[in-house]
Amino acid sequence: MAAQTSAPAAAVMQRHAEPITIRKTVIGEGTPKIIIPTTGATADQVLQQAKTIGADTDADLIEYRIDYLDFADDAAKVGALGKQVAAAADGKPLILTFRTKSEGGVKTISDKAYGDLYLSLIKDGFIDILDVEMFRDAKVVNQVVTAAHKAGIKVVMSSHDFHKTPSVDEMVARLRKQDSMGADILKIAVMPHNSEDVARLMDATGQIRDKYSLKPLLTMSMGGLGAVSRLSGEVFGDDLTFGMLGTPSAPGQIEAHQLHQEMDTLHLAIANH
């Protein structure tokens, strides 16, 4: 009889959130859902991207990145285009995001203007999820979150560090604060300088899921070094991830079809443990 050459596989826990359903997309089960952002500056560019995302079976959600737009401060134009983007997305949930320059976005905007723009767009009725940066003025954030929830819009609260990876304790504290501030989805994106930085991001993600919150998580270590965090989210507790079709909106994004294949492979390995 041949000797056993390896130990039995240990049980693997799938760290899913309590599921939330937006349109027909369930966030918090199976592989992390893939978000594809628009990066166009003009209405024509954005609509073409939205049609491509809407038709792509590897894309689960569309992020309408309004800070890329030439007319980002014109609420009427942004809202009118947003309705067209939502229609082109073919039923996929729409995340609206103005990523401010201080958090890695394209444009600078005052806290008041940020709040006024969001409050106007909330009324237009095309947003499913609203990205709110946690470090904007506290009163503005509270006002926007309250208005979004009254309109039936989910809030993904976000924090970005394009320069470094904070300590595990700091990342856990930010995500817990987002939870307490009324976020429906918790998000942090950080920049690694070595493999230990990537491991810290994954550690923080696992701690939030294990100890503090069952809300959906969207955490990532950016750049090529952090790409593993975009692929392995199901193991550590992530329920969403970013992919790309054409132009990335952040360093380290992976083409959507490849990302889907890799996550499916990992999902099968977990399921067959």
Image (tube, rainbow, N blue to C red):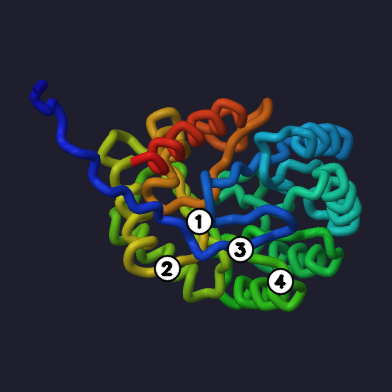
The residue singled out by tag 4 in the image is 148
For marks 2 and 1, the one nearer the N-term is: 1
Give the CA distance from mark 2 to mark 1: 12 Å
From this view, report whether residue 179 is shown above or below residue 81: below
In this view, the mark in front (2 or 1) = 2
Marks 4 and 2, the one that precedes in the sequence: 4
Measured as percent of width and height from the top left, residue 256 is found at 61, 31
Amino acid at the residue labelled 3: Ile
Label 1 sits on a secondary structure element that is strand
Residues 248 and 164: in front is: 248
Locate residue 96, reporting x and y percent: 71, 54
Q: Please provide percent x and percent y for residue 130.
A: 68, 60
Nearer to us in this view, 77 or 228: 228
Label at residue 187: 1
Disc 4 and disc 3 in contact, CB within 8 angstroms: no
The answer to whether the residue labelled 2 contacts the one labelled 1, judged by CB atoms less than 8 Å apart, is: no
The amino acid pointed to by label 2 is Ser
The residue pinned by badge 2 equals 213
Marks 4 and 2 sit apart, C-alpha to C-alpha, by 21 Å
Task: Give the residue number, with chain letter if any, for mark 3.
Answer: 20
Question: What's the amino acid at mark 1?
Answer: Lys
1 lies left or right of 35: left
Q: Pick whichever of labels 1 and 4 is earlier in the sequence.
A: 4
Residue at image coords 60%, 48%: 101
- Work out whether residue 138 or residue 40 is closer to the camera in this orientation and state it: 40
**Between discs 1 and 3, the one toward the N terminus:** 3
Residue that appears at 85% across and 38% down: 47
Q: Return the residue nearer the eye: 16 or 121.
A: 16
> Alpha-carbon neighbours of circle 2 within 10 Å: few (<14), some, or many (≥20)?
some
